[in-house]
Every structure is written in C-alpha cells, then in structure tokens.
Amino acid sequence: MNAPATRFVSRTVVLPQRNIDTDQIIPARFLTTTERAGLGRHAFADWRLREDGSPDPQFPFNRPENAGASILVAGRNFGCGSSREHAPWALVDLGLRAVISAEIADIFRSNAQKNGLLPIVLDEAIVDELIARPGIELAIDIAAATVSMPDGRCFAFPLDAFARTCLIEGVDALGYLLRQEAAITAFESSHPRHFEESVHAS
Amino acid sequence: MSPKTLFEKLWDAHQVVAETEATPAILYIDLHLVHEVTSPQAFAELDARGLAVRQPGRTKATLDHSTPTLAAGADGRLPWSSGEAEHQVATLRRNTRRHGIELFDFDSGRRGIVHVVGPELGFTQPGMTIVCGDSHTATHGAFGALAFGIGSSEVAHVLATQCLLQRKPKSLAITVSGQLAPGVSAKDLILHVIGTIGVNGGTGHVIEYRGSAIEALSMEERMTVCNMSIEAGARAGLIAPDETTFAWLAAAPRAPKGAAFDATVARWQAFRSDEGARFDREVHIDAAQIRPSVTWGTHPGQVAPIDARIPSGGGADADKARAYMGWHEGEPVAGRPVDVVFVGSCTNGRLSDLREVARILAGRRVHPRVRMLVVPGSDPVKRDAEAEGIDRIVREAGAEWREAGCSMCIAMNGDMVAPGQLAVSTSNRNFEGRQGKGARTVLASPATAAACAVAGMITDPRAFLSTEAA
C-alpha cells in the first residue's frame, strides 16, 4: 500500500440511513470471487441499480455532481454485519477514502483501516449536520486527525496511533507482525501444549 | 491480585506483547478456522510475499458458504450455482493442500458450516483464542473461548504469524436470571437480548452471558446465544465453561482423551469470572419476561414478541424497515402469510434444532403455500438426524431435506428467496436482500419456523406445543 497524502479535500456523498450493513455495501451473491480488485461495480448494488439493471439516477453515487467525491457520510452504526473485507475493497474501488458516521461497526472499522479507508467517528450532532448538507466540501487531515468545514470549524476524531502510523507512513501491519518473530517464538515455547497434543493428531 | 473477568483471563493468557498507546497488543491465536469465501485473497497475500503458514496444524478448513445443498447428480457432478463458486472451492482445496492444512471436504464425512464443525470435532475448547474470517465466529464463545470474526487481511496475518494486532475491547456482562418459560427457546432469548440492547448495543465490547437461565442451557443452545453476539455489534460472546461444556468435549472426537482430558479439565475450570470481577457495563434480564420472539424489521435489533403488534414510530429507519417488509404500524405480527421457511445455519442448524422442528412437523403437513428447506449444519448432524428418522418426518411433511451448508442464510449458493417473498428463517440476519434480492426475512426459533410452515402464516409455536401436551 502506498502512503497516502496526509491531507485531502473532497465533497461528501450522503447516505443518511442508520445501520447500513455489509450486505448493503456488497451483497453476498458477489462474494464467490477469489479476487479483491474491481468490486466497486457491485458496491450498493441493490440500492444503486433499478429492477431492470439500469442505474437509479436518484441514488447518490449515481448523481453526476457526486462524481469523484471521496468522503461518504452515513447514518449511525455504518458497516454492521458480516466480516467481509469485500465491503471496504468495494468502497475503495468506488473511489472513497473516508467514511464519516456517528458510530462505525468494529470489524468494518478494522478492515477499512487496513485498506487505506479512513473510518471517522464524529458526534451525532455534527454528523446530522453533514447529513443535512450533502455535497459540502470537507478537508480531512490524517496527521492531525481533524475534519474541517468550509466555515472554518474543525472537529477532531479518534484515530488509533498505530492506525495513523500505518496510514501516514505506509507501515504494513503484516510486516510489523513478521518482525515480532522472536517474541512469538518465545510465547509459543511457554504456551500450554494440550492443543497440539490432541487436536493435531488426526 | 484483583478479581478478573473470564474475558481478561483469556486476553492475558494470549498476550504475546501487551498493548501500548502507540501499538496494539499482539494476541496469539490458538485455532484458526478457514472457509472458501474469505480466504483466497489471504492465501494470495502470502504468495505475493513468499510467506509460509506458520502453524498449519492450528488452522482447520471446511467448505460451507458457496457449496450446493443438493446432492451430486447421476454424473457425479455437484450442482454448482456458478463456475465461480466451484472455482472458489477448488482454490481452497489447492491452498490447503499446498500449505498442509487439514480440510474437511465432501469426502470427509465431517464437512459442514465452520461454526458447527469446530465444536462438533472438539477443536473448539475452553480457554482458547479462536478466529475465522466470518463474523459468526462468536459462536465458539459458548465454550469459554475468546472467538471473533476477522477480515481477510487478518486471515493472512494469522496464517503467516499465528498472531493478530488487537486493541483490548471493553467487557459487558449480560445476566439472565430466572428460568425460561415453557415454549421459549435460546433463540428467543438472544433475539430478546438484541432487541433490548440494540443492534449496536455491544459495539466495542465482549459480552459474557451469565445467570441461571444461561447456566441451564445445553451447549447447542449456548452456541445459538453466542452466535448472535455480533448482531448486537459485539466483538465476541462468552459463556464460562462448566460440567455441560466438559460433557460435550468428553464425547468430541478431537478433544483430549483419557488422563490428558482430566488434566485439561482442571485447567479449563479456571476460565470463569472471579467473584467480584468488574465489567465495564452490566445488563440484567429476567428470563421469565421473554416470550417467543421474531424480528419484524431489517436488522436483528428490530424484535417483537410473536403475540405482539408491529411497533409504531421509531423514525425514518423504522418507517423504511416497515415499508421494505410490507408491515403497517400496529398490525399483529401473527397471521402474516409466509412464502418460505428456512431451517438451518450456524445459529440453528444443529441436531437439537432439527429435533425441535421434527417434533412439530411429525404427523402434520407444510402448508401448500410454503416452500420449506431443512438444511443440516454438518454431515454428522445430517447422519445423526437421519438415524433418528428426522429426514423422513421432514420429507413426509412436504419439506426439502438438503445437504449441509450455509444455504439460504447467506444465499450465495443458489438457495434463495424470491423478490418480495416473506421467509421465516432460523438464521441470524434479516438485512435487506440477505436471503436474495428483495427478499423479506423474519428471524425466528426452529419451533416458530416449523409452526409457521404448517400454519402458512406467522404463528405462535406454543399453540403446537400445547396440542402435543393434550
């Protein structure tokens, strides 16, 4: 993963619904793939397309004024449901770089961070204001962990120190874990062995 | 030493490196379960970096999501829903063979839903950390194991290092005191819990279920409860191991045997919350208040007792859910016509669930309007059920008896509900389109599902149980 710029500016796309689950972000019927690329075409498939398969012109991601927008603002508890990493893969492929909500589900948040998609949790009152003003231009500063409004107001959001390092410096979590080899080996030598003795004997 | 919760004991026993402000904890993973859907990209990541699987013996694989539930045809070919589904399964076969990972394939006699297979074989044991690229990994918490779902990037982390980077979640105790009323199941209990704390009520937390109503549950019922922890947003669900747990493991083929079993039980017994241990949050529920319950909306927190009416109000999201489901405010839940009934899934696809269904179907017919699918959770569940004649009862009632798999719970193998149809389902998610595009899902217990199948409409299962008693 390339290190992204630490600051970017974009208009918002708004999906006001609460509890947007990963089955809405990418329906399960698209999960028979063994790839992770190109899933953006299935993002919000059942909301984006009409019954005849043509794009619904009313759906926010189909509206011409939202082309190129990279910030999604969504109702509370975004990304609940399954652990499918296909959800952030699809959103990143759609061009998104940040999701703002009053609450973001745990597994989705973890998956998003690993793919350079920034999960931003702000107070509900601020999110409600953003929901009411779709298309507003926001500046997101990853290093400072802030979202700035066009009127100059600036809101801090919680960003785990390690996640921030990964996003800014392009630190790779698997590479970091692999470098803990000595600690892992030491742990394995002292960890109870009953599992190996029973489960592994096939 | 200050008293610890079960969760803290599990966490502390698996910390390779403790967390700091700058870095998450490194947590050791005892058991990694793998299925065909969320693993191909993880194995590809290993290949791209030229990495091996660190502990192939600690990873076990099965095939469940994309697999057909119809048997092979006369030509010996399975009726795959697509070439892509077949390719996905072939990819896991190739990956497990290359890396020396045990796979429970079609010819193993042990294949099934990953969260049914692990406990059945005895891989799932108290005191363990267990992960899988699947959010219903919470199921294994029923044995007092810290078990949670992960994404495919993390599947690669575990394959390569047997470890995960994790921030310590908070703890939530849900105490269910008293006794469940007759005709009220573990599924009703967990639906009631999610309806009470909300679809995001457990976010950031590991739940420990405790209290007399929890202790009274069988292992299968405990798995039903822990399975749906994620539907309240929780990271995991836990129940402290006890004699019920040890009796299950004593009969499980791959759990320790003989003297090793006795020694291990002594170790397992330490995995319970100490007297006076403090939780970050506590919720108390009176079991006697729980009635047979179903979901009425489009997430598992929208729950109502089956003898209640569809709630009014609730804002734009409740309006949207009612519109999608075709409900009106104040309409009785019972009496709504049903098109499809699905019995199965990692929530309710075990032998006791199928027995419950057979008890209601015996001597009765599925309503002509209803298509009913009964899908065992694993090959052994199917065999055991057939040995008891459950398959015959299901078929004679007019329902379909299928091969093991996730089937209509996630509807990615071709088993699906048609647009606009209403399905009563023993599975775990009623999201829009979960069981097929435009499908409407009502989550229910196995008894409720069977009662609905016979009546052709949403029906209180207690009516059927009292008939039996008479």
Image (cartoon, coloured by chain):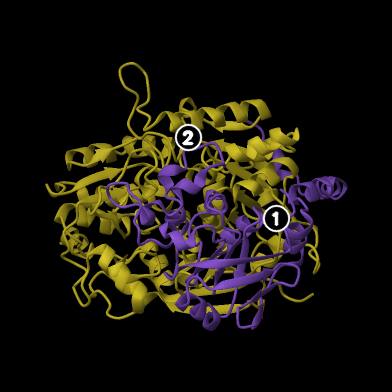
Chain colours: A purple, B yellow
Relative placement, left or right, of A114 versus B68 is right
How packed mark 2 is, by other alpha carbons closer than 10 Å (few <14, some 14-19, many 20 or more), is: many
Q: Can residue B131 be seen in this view?
A: yes
Q: Is residue B59 above or below residue A106?
A: above
Q: Quadrant of the C terminus of chain B?
A: bottom left
Residue type, numbered disc 1: Arg
The subunit carrying tag 2 is B
Query: Where, by quadrant of the figure, is residue B237 drawn?
Result: bottom right
Secondary structure category for the residue under label 1: helix
Q: Mark 1 points at which residue?
A: B267
Specify the farthest residue to the top. Answer: B75
Q: Is disc 1 in the same subunit as disc 2?
A: yes
Q: Can residue B115 be seen in this view?
A: no
Residue drawn at point x = 60 percent, y = 39 percent = B41
Q: Name the residue under label 2.
A: B111
Residue A181 percent location from the top left of the image: 84, 45
Residue type, numbered disc 2: Arg
Residue drawn at point x = 50 percent, y = 32 percent = B88
Specify the farthest residue to the left. Answer: B368
Relative placement, left or right, of B425 versus A169 is left
Residue B403 percent location from the top left of the image: 36, 35
